[in-house]
């Protein structure tokens, strides 16, 4: 799954693809690199991000979806029912839902749905995340949401543990280490560790530095965690660096 952020403030590439034509061109590049799905988002959900109103989000994503429709399977990355419905009308067939609340929309429209776990809201989720057992709690949450979606009639359900969404580095690493427990629940698993801040901190530590490694210099950490996820049974990798992720997947599958 290739990432197309049509936002001014995403943590990795905010502002680079805010122009619709530039975003469309980027999406086509990711398809050429091997992406089977393009995930298009118009609202940043990075830690500390401010919410975006419906009209602004629609203005960002709909021209891009319309421009890419028919070139690749399209996913809409949104928490808003209005945006999800408009995106599906424009050509999206998958809702990537960080709120894990839009399964009634997916059922109504007959499209796929990704339920992601997040503790809190983007603006405050990293303030003080706490779990008694992060793996068990994330599994329980995803199981409950996936079962609700299935009962509502959603035919295609994915689950995402939500790396970096209301979790410390220790929480993220525990989820990665025990990803097989999420896979064993039976729904296909999406993993998105690409360029995440936890990698910036881990890479800085490995370099003997206290400075966060910049987002565009986290490829090694991204690929390492993506390969681990593939070997644990993840079905889809959400990535900025699609060519590198595809190459890693081929090595894993060899």
Image (cartoon, rainbow, N blue to C red):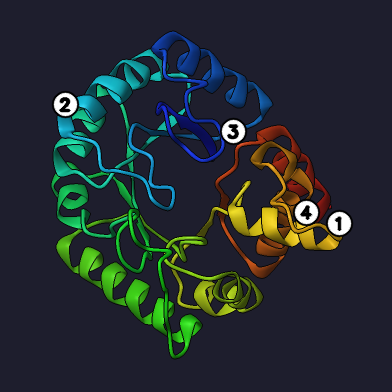
Q: Are marks 4 and 3 in contact (CB under 8 Å)?
A: no
Q: Is residue 107 above or below residue 30?
A: below
Which residue shows up at 36% across the image and 81% down it?
140
Which class describes the residues within 10 Å of circle 4: few (<14), some (14-19), or many (20+)? Answer: few
Earlier in the chain: of badge 2 and badge 3, it is 3
| Residue 220 place in picture, x, y as percent | 79, 48
- How far apart are the alpha carbons under marks 1 and 3? 31 Å
Helix, strand or loop status at disc 1: loop
Circle 3: element type: loop
Badge 1 local density, few (<14 within 10 Å), some, or many (20+)? few
Secondary structure under tag 4 reads helix
**Left or right of 142, for residue 180:** right
Report, in whole angstroms, how far the alpha carbon at label 2 lies from the one at label 4: 43 Å
Disc 2: which residue: 55
Give the residue number, with chain letter if any, for mark 3: 35
Say which mark, if any, is on residue 253.
4
Q: How many marks?
A: 4
Q: For numbered disc 2, what is the local secondary structure?
A: helix
Closer to the chain start, of discs 1 and 4, is 1
Q: Are marks 2 and 1 in contact (CB under 8 Å)?
A: no
Q: Position of residue 208 (x, y in %)?
A: 86, 61
Instruction: Name the image quarter holding residue 104.
Output: bottom left
Q: Residue at x 34, y 31 (%)?
A: 42
Apparent side of residue 198 relative to residue 150 in the rendered image (left or right):
right
Picture layout, residue 174 above or below residue 240: below
Q: Residue furthest bottom?
A: 132
Q: Which residue is identified by label 1?
A: 207
Sequence-first tag of 4 and 3: 3
Task: Check the picture and name the quadrant holding the N terminus.
Answer: top right
Of the two numbered discs 2 and 1 on the same chain, state the one appearing first in sequence: 2
State how far apart marks 1 and 4 are (Cα). 30 Å
């Amino acid at each position: 799954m290739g990432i197309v952020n049509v936002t001014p403030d995403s943590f990795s590439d905010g502002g680079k693809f805010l122009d619709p034509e530039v975003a469309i061109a980027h999406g086509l590049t990711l398809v050429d690199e091997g992406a089977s799905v393009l995930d298009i988002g118009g609202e940043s959900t990075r830690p500390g991000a401010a919410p975006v109103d419906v009209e602004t989000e629609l203005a960002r994503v709909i021209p891009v979806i319309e421009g890419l429709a028919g070139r690749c399977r399209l996913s809409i990355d949104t928490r808003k029912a209005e945006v999800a419905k408009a995106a599906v009308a424009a050509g999206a067939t998958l809702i990537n839902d960080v709120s894990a609340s839009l399964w009634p929309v997916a059922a109504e429209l007959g499209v796929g749905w990704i339920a992601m776990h997040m503790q809190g809201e983007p603006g405050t989720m990293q303030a003080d995340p706490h779990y008694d057992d992060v793996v068990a709690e994330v599994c329980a949450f995803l199981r409950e949401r996936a079962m609700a979606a299935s009962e509502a009639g959603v035919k295609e359900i994915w689950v995402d543990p939500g790396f970096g969404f209301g979790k410390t580095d220790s929480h993220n690493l525990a989820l990665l280490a025990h990803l097989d427990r999420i896979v064993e629940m039976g729904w296909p698993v999406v993993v998105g560790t690409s360029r995440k801040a936890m990698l910036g901190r881990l890479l800085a530590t490995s370099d003997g530095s206290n400075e966060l490694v910049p987002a565009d210099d986290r490829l090694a950490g991204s690929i390492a965690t993506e390969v681990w996820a593939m070997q644990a049974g993840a079905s889809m990798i959400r990535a900025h660096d699609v060519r590198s992720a595809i190459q890693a997947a081929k090595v894993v599958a060899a």
